[in-house]
Image (cartoon, grey):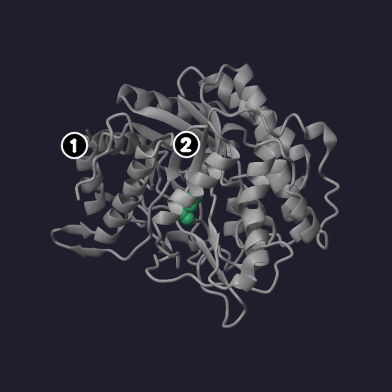
């Protein structure tokens, strides 16, 4: 069946600063630079410089975007490139880089869509306590204001945070992501302060006349075949999905979570004065969808799926993750119908808020020969998820667009260069870009859209 994309449905690609920019000399350090120096923290020892050397190859990458003819490009500002010490003085060079990026997109007719925080907390703010500390939320709001005052005239859509779940629970509970801390109580304080920072930043963005302000989550449907797993499903769903949706919707921390996590926190960080700030009205919601969580009673060892770790779940009851084939290279179950469940969750919690799928894509094996880089599984993955969106739109869901993750092969966080999500290959040794089959397919899809 041919995929019929409606003419008003936005198609784009996404990246994030630490994963592609490089040029550590031109910015302050972030928690990911520090994490990368811990032996074994990043599997292949990759570091944030040169990454894809995007800062020095900006024109080439802008031309790639123009060749794809995407409607929009989603990138993230690096907080330590804008404010090297996390608060106070800004860097003229750093801001100048983003001027060139945003202006270069506009010159090519591509809509800039910016995320303010995609996990690269300035190192000095981590030394001051990181996201478990309330003050970090206020520093984030100050940074948001600086960026919005400079770019509100040119950036069309703003996301405060990308996937706060990862920052909080992989960063502060399992410690498999930067900053590599393992304290369940701290991770709950972190998720709360991230959403507080979001709410404070929304106010500053609006004051600076920023248009279209939202947030990007990774809502993940949780399923189990075994009925006895219902309480576990609820606990994980609470931490992955409901805590953030409920805070954004003005319902506070879900009462069941307050109880099920009582062994690891007294929730003293939740303050009454935050009640009006947390549900700051948003203009749109982004969902990054890759997979579901399938959980099962304890049995064999945990699956090797990246990010699916019981250690990332505060007060985790006995359980294991049990993804089913087909799997991507990340060990993630491929299940396009889960995208519908994730978006329904968003709509149920925040009715009337338009949705974008801000990331979707796959790390999969590729075949390279003299005719090119063949990645049919990636193309199928993208097409199957787009089909879900087209069907949902027909049913009346307000879904406005979709961005492939990712434009480039890049630093896949703790997996370094070992997992490739790009529709364009990047040679880690030389930085050379080579278009894959999936990029040619996506380009034709955009060109042939209804
Ligand atoms: O690479 C990441 C991205 O930074 C955030 N969302 C998931 C992607 C794949 O793991």
User: SS at mark 1?
Assistant: helix
Residue 273 is left or right of residue 197, and the answer is right
Residue closer to the observer: 206 or 339 = 339
Work out whether mark 1 precedes mark 2 in sequence or the reverse, and give the earlier one.
2
Is 203 above or below relative to 300?
A: above
Image point (22%, 35%), residue name: 449
Is 450 above or below relative to 376?
A: above
**Residue 216 appears anywhere in the view:** no
Residue 314 is left or right of residue 95, and the answer is right
Badge 2 is on which residue?
Answer: 355
Residue closer to the observer: 261 or 305 = 261
Is 117 above or below relative to 294?
A: above
Callout 1: few (<14), some (14-19), or many (20+) C-alpha neighbours within 10 Å? few
Image point (53%, 31%), residue name: 352
Q: Position of residue 47 (x, y in %)?
A: 51, 56
Q: Position of residue 158 (x, y in %)?
A: 52, 30
Badge 1 is on which residue?
Answer: 448
Image point (53%, 40%), residue name: 347
User: Residue at the bottom extreme?
Assistant: 300
């Amino acid at each position: 069946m041919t995929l019929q994309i409606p003419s008003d449905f936005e198609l784009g690609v996404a990246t994030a600063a630490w994963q592609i920019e490089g040029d550590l000399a031109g910015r302050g350090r972030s928690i990911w630079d520090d994490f990368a120096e811990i032996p074994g923290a990043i599997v292949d020892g990759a570091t944030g410089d040169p990454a894809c050397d995007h800062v020095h190859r900006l024109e080439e990458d802008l031309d790639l975007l123009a060749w794809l003819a995407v409607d929009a490009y989603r990138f993230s500002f690096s907080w330590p490139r804008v404010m090297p010490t996390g608060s106070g003085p800004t860097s003229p060079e750093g801001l100048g880089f983003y001027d060139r990026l945003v202006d270069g997109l506009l010159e090519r007719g591509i809509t800039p869509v910016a995320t303010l925080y995609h996990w690269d907390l300035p190192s000095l703010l981590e030394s001051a306590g990181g996201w478990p500390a309330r003050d970090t939320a206020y520093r984030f709001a100050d940074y948001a204001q600086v960026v919005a005052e400079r770019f509100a005239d040119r950036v069309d859509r703003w996301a405060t945070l990308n996937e706060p779940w990862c920052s909080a629970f992989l960063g502060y509970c399992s410690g498999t992501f930067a900053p590599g801390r393992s304290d369940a109580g701290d991770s709950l304080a972190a998720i709360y302060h991230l959403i507080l920072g979001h709410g404070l930043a929304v106010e500053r963005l609006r004051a600076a006349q920023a248009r279209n302000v939202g947030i990007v989550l990774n809502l993940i449907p949780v399923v189990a075949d075994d009925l006895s797993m219902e309480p576990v499903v609820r606990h994980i769903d609470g931490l992955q999905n409901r805590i953030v949706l409920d805070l954004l919707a003005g319902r506070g921390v879900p009462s069941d979570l307050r109880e099920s996590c009582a062994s690891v926190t007294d929730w003293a960080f939740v303050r009454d004065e935050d009640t009006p700030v947390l549900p700051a009205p948003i203009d749109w919601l982004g969902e990054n969808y890759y997979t579901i969580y399938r959980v099962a009673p304890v049995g064999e060892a945990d699956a090797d799926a990246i990010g699916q770790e019981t250690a990332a779940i505060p007060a985790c009851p006995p359980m294991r993750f049990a993804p089913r084939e087909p799997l991507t290279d990340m060990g993630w179950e491929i299940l396009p119908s889960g995208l519908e469940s994730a978006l329904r969750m968003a709509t149920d919690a925040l009715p009337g808020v338009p949705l974008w799928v801000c990331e979707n894509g796959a790390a999969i094996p590729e075949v390279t020969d003299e005719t090119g880089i063949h990645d049919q599984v990636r193309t199928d993955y993208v097409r199957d998820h787009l089909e879900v969106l087209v069907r949902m739109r027909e049913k009346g869901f307000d879904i406005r667009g979709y961005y492939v993750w990712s434009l480039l092969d890049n630093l896949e966080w703790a997996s370094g260069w070992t997992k490739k999500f790009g529709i364009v290959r990047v040679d880690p040794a030389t930085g050379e870009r080579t278009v894959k089959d999936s990029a040619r397919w996506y380009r034709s899809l955009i060109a042939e859209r209804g």
